[in-house]
């Protein structure tokens, strides 16, 4: 069937951040002449009726994040006729904002026109190796949003020295998962965790595969897929360990840090008076807070060859981002181009680097200026929308 894409279906009413990303992209799609329909996951019945009036075979595609609309939701799936996407021959483009091993139980029974988009190149390689039955549609990293006027907020109005936007779960929470089978398995899991905490430049799957092969010999791909899905807690353990360590290190060095998100009350830190806790909030409020910050700290959620939106959001709203590096980030933003890199193993250097930034307003401003020029050109959601639209047009032509 010939496809001439004029209409795009996207989603709201699920995870707030994903709806925010979608709406940022939708603004650009509309500017490019596409009609965009938002299916509301909180109003399945009403949305399903409107969806069927909107979609037209040969003219419509679906773009989603994290399998929204692909989980056999009542409004888009029935046991009798399957997915509405198959019924109307609508290609589906899913941007997976987490590693494929988080979604192993969802990577089954997907529509015929399913296309998987990765936000990290190592995650893309994992998907290609372990899910060959589905089409990988490429690497599209997360992007950022700059609020109008954020860059004009002067130094003296930036009343937050250091900010971290994100939730925290203490590593102790994951002990129940480490110990869920028996002591032998617990020792196996701890071995992987200890290696990841020591050698932080490797992915969870790289460390896990080595440990599995050491214990069991060669592991079949289907078996390894299942093993990784059952070890998601290891990924969550290491990313939360370092997230907590960054805030603890700064606070205990006498630096006041504003944290926005759940769970920070549980941080074990001897200087909690230097940690100002704000409740979890929406994307727009986080961006507004970034526009009043001098420095934003980021810990990559174990993306070793991708980027997190926190990095680009910080720069676009006038804050220098202090972050651990990834291969992709270092290609796109060199040291001093909106970012200052601190390796996780080099935590002792973090307080001094942050103090230097806080004491040098003009230097900080120059770092943001250099980074902003790159991010505005290459790393906004508008740019991601343009890239994806070009890919979809090329795919339709084939």
Image (cartoon, helix red, strand yellow):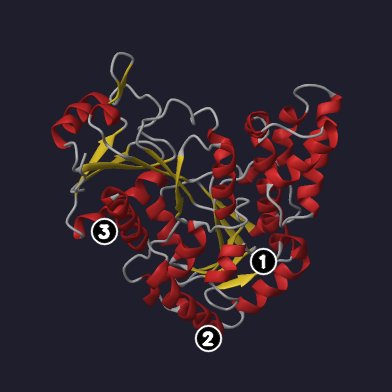
Q: Nearer the viewer, mark 3 or mark 1?
A: 3
Q: Could you tell me which residue is drawn at 67 percent across and 57 percent down? A: 247
Q: Could you tell me which residue is drawn at 53 percent across and 47 percent down? A: 261
Q: Secondary structure at mark 3?
A: helix
Quick one: which residue is furthest to the bottom in this view? 362
Most foreground residue, 24 or 110: 110
Distance from label 3 to label 1 (Cα)?
A: 40 Å
Most foreground residue, 368 or 278: 368
Mark before the other along the chain sequence, 3 or 1: 3
Q: Secondary structure at mark 1?
A: loop
Q: Could you tell me which residue is drawn at 26 percent across and 42 percent down? A: 61
Q: Secondary structure at mark 2?
A: helix
Q: Which residue is mark 2?
A: 362
Residue 317 visible here:
no
Q: Which residue is mark 3?
A: 28
Against 397, residue 55 (above or below) is above
Q: Is residue 299 left or right of residue 70?
A: right
Q: Nearer the viewer, mark 3 or mark 2?
A: 3
Q: Position of residue 286 (x, y in %)?
A: 44, 56
Q: Which residue is mark 1?
A: 255
């Amino acid at each position: 069937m010939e496809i001439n894409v004029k209409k795009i279906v996207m989603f709201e009413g699920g995870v707030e951040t994903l709806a925010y990303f979608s709406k940022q992209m939708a603004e650009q799609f509309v500017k490019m002449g596409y009609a965009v329909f938002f299916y509301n996951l909180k109003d399945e019945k009403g949305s399903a009726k409107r969806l069927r009036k909107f979609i037209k075979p040969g003219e419509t595609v679906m773009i989603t994040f994290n399998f929204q609309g692909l989980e056999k939701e009542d409004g888009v799936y029935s046991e009798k006729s399957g997915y509405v996407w198959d019924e109307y021959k609508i290609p589906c483009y899913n941007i997976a904002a987490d590693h494929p091993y988080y979604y192993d139980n969802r990577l089954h029974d997907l529509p015929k026109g399913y296309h998987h988009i990765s936000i990290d190149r190592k995650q893309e390689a994992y998907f290609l190796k372990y899910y060959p039955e589905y089409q990988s549609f490429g690497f599209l990293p997360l992007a950022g949003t700059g609020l109008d006027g954020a860059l004009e907020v002067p130094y003296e109005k930036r009343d937050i020295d250091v900010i971290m936007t994100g939730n925290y779960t203490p590593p102790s929470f994951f002990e129940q998962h480490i110990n869920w089978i028996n002591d032998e398995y617990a020792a196996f899991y701890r071995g992987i965790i200890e290696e990841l905490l020591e050698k932080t430049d490797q992915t969870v799957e790289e460390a896990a595969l080595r440990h599995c092969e050491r214990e069991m010999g060669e592991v079949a791909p289907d078996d390894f897929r299942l093993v990784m899905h059952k070890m998601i807690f290891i990924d969550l353990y290491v990313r939360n360990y370092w997230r907590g360590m960054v805030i603890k290190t700064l606070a205990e060095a006498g630096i006041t840090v504003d944290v926005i998100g759940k769970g920070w009350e549980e941080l074990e830190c001897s200087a909690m008076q230097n940690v100002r806790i704000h409740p979890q909030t929406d994307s727009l409020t986080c961006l507004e807070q970034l526009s009043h910050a001098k420095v934003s700290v980021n810990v990559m959620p174990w993306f070793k060859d991708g980027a997190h939106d926190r990095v680009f959001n910080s720069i676009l709203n006038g804050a220098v981002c202090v972050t651990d590096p990834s291969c992709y980030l270092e290609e796109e933003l060199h040291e001093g181009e909106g970012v200052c890199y601190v390796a996780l193993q080099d935590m002792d250097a973090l307080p001094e680097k942050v103090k230097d930034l806080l004491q040098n307003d003009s230097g900080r401003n120059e770092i943001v200026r250099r980074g902003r020029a790159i991010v505005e050109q290459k790393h906004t959601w508008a740019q991601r929308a343009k890239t994806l639209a070009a890919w979809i047009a090329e795919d339709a032509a084939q």
